[in-house]
Each structure stands twice: as structure tokens, then as C-alpha cells.
Amino acid sequence: MSSETKEVVSEEVLAGPSEARGMLIIVASPSGGGKGTLIRHVLKTVPNVGYSVSFTTRPARDGETNGQDYFFVSEETFREMITRGEFLEWARVHAHLYGTGRAQVEKELKERRDIILEIDVQGAESVRKLVPGAVAVFILPPSFEILRDRLVARGSEHPSDLSLRLKNARSEVERFREFDYVIINDDAERAGAQLASVVYAERARRERQQQLAEEILGSFPL
Ligand code: 5GP
């Protein structure tokens, strides 16, 4: 984790689960793990969930929209943003820089919306250290062969980038142990429903319901 990210974390983000703010849901997987599809399922079916649009120095792929999939920025702009403390976390992933903008996350949490962070294992580690109560979900492909086939079929990567992603996959998958939930993406519909269930279950945690439950209790005569 960079020292910059440590310095800039704010009260909004640091608020624990008992503070009735929205929660941070980290979703990580190796490249080609299919997390994008599962996240889209949650955004479509679960109310009151936002998506953190990351910043990246990676060039846009065909079909990607600036401001929707990512904010595509130059390395110079990205470095300036680091200096200004505008990232909650950032990391070099494969060959590019990626970072979670602090402002959007703070806004969503303040508005009591949950927010999904689609980030890599390094980002997941940084955010979990910074934010108590962040929920971390790892999306696991059923096997290396299936991951490789999916990545090749996607055809979105330059061959050298593709082999780098496959090379890094094992060290990413090894870190599933650091996560609260593991979802095996064998079937997108089933796995998407499971991710939605995690969000619903986490919302019902006693720590998150404490304040409301106390108020309800208060309405009962002694
Ligand atoms: P891709 O280039 O395939 O869109 O993303 C490559 C990797 O970077 C994925 O594992 C993705 O989750 C991760 N990533 C995307 N945005 C961020 C971010 O803001 N921070 C971090 N640490 N990783 C990110």
C-alpha cells in the first residue's frame, strides 16, 4: 500500500459497519474470471448498489466507454492524482496503473448506498486494511484451463498482455484465502445470484442493523 492512500482516507470511508453507512464490497478475481458479468447482475437486481468507476492508464478496449467502464487517463495525470491524494487505493496491475477514486466512494457511502469495487488482490488488501467492515469476495474460475479459454475467446488483449495475465493468475488465485467469500464462477447466472445473496446477507449483519434494531427496541414498552 502506498503511504499516500493511508494519509487521505477520510471519516466517511473509515466509518465502521455500525454507523449505518453504505458498505464497501470488494470483488476480485484473476483476469478472465468473469467478475464483470456477475457485478452487472448485482447492479441490475439489487437496489441501492453503486459501482466504483476506477481510473486506469490502460488503453480503452473496443466497446469500452470512458467514465463508464473506467476513466482512461495518462500516466502523468494518474501520477498527479496520486500526489493530490485522490485515490483510496491504487496499484500497478499487470502492466498498467489502476486506482479507486476516493470522491465517488465517499459520496456513495454518505448517501448510504453500497458500492462495489472491482479491484485486484493488491487493492483488496489495501482497502481491507483501511476500511473495517469492507466485505471481500473472490471470484474463482472453475479451473486454469477454463480461465485461459475465456481469456483467449475474449480476444481483447494483446498477446503479450494475455500471457502476462495468465502468468500472474496463479499468484492472484493463491490469495483467495484472504477473502470473506469465494464464489466459483461455473455458471454466470448462478454465480451472479450468489453474489447478490452475499450483498443481501451482509446487509442483515447484526452490526449493520444495530442502530435500527435499537430504535425498534426503544418503541417497545418497558
Ligand atoms: P482490466 O485491465 O482487465 O480491466 O483489469 C485488470 C485488473 O485490474 C483486474 O483485476 C481489475 O479488477 C483490476 N482493477 C481495476 N480497477 C482497479 C482499481 O481501481 N484498483 C486496483 N487495485 N485494481 C483494479
Image (cartoon, rainbow, N blue to C red):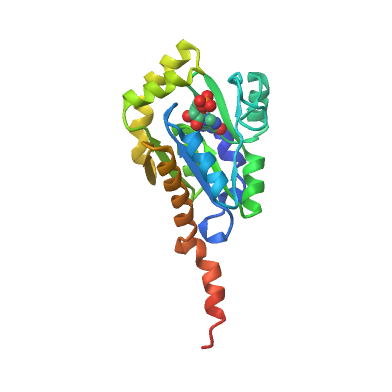
Q: How many marks?
A: 0
What residue lies at 61% left-to-right and 23% top-to-bottom? 63
Up-down relation of residue 92 to residue 160 (above or below): below
Q: Up-down: is 184 above or below 207?
A: above
Front residue of this view, candidates 70 and 73: 70
Location of residue 75 (image quadrant)? top right
> In this view of the protein, can residue 90 be seen by the observer?
no
Asked if residue 211 shows in the view, the reply is yes
Percent x, y of residue 3: 55, 34
The x, y position of residue 29, in whole percent, is 43, 33
User: Measuring 47% from the left and 61% from the top, which residue is drawn there?
Assistant: 204
Q: What is the x, y in percent for residue 167?
A: 37, 19
Q: Is residue 103 left or right of residue 167?
A: right
Q: Position of residue 31 (x, y in %)?
A: 44, 26
Q: Quadrant of residue 55?
A: top right
Up-down relation of residue 212 to residue 129 (above or below): below
Seen as rendered, the residue at the extreme bottom is 222
Point 51% across, 65% down: residue: 209
Q: Residue at x 50, y 12 (%)?
A: 158
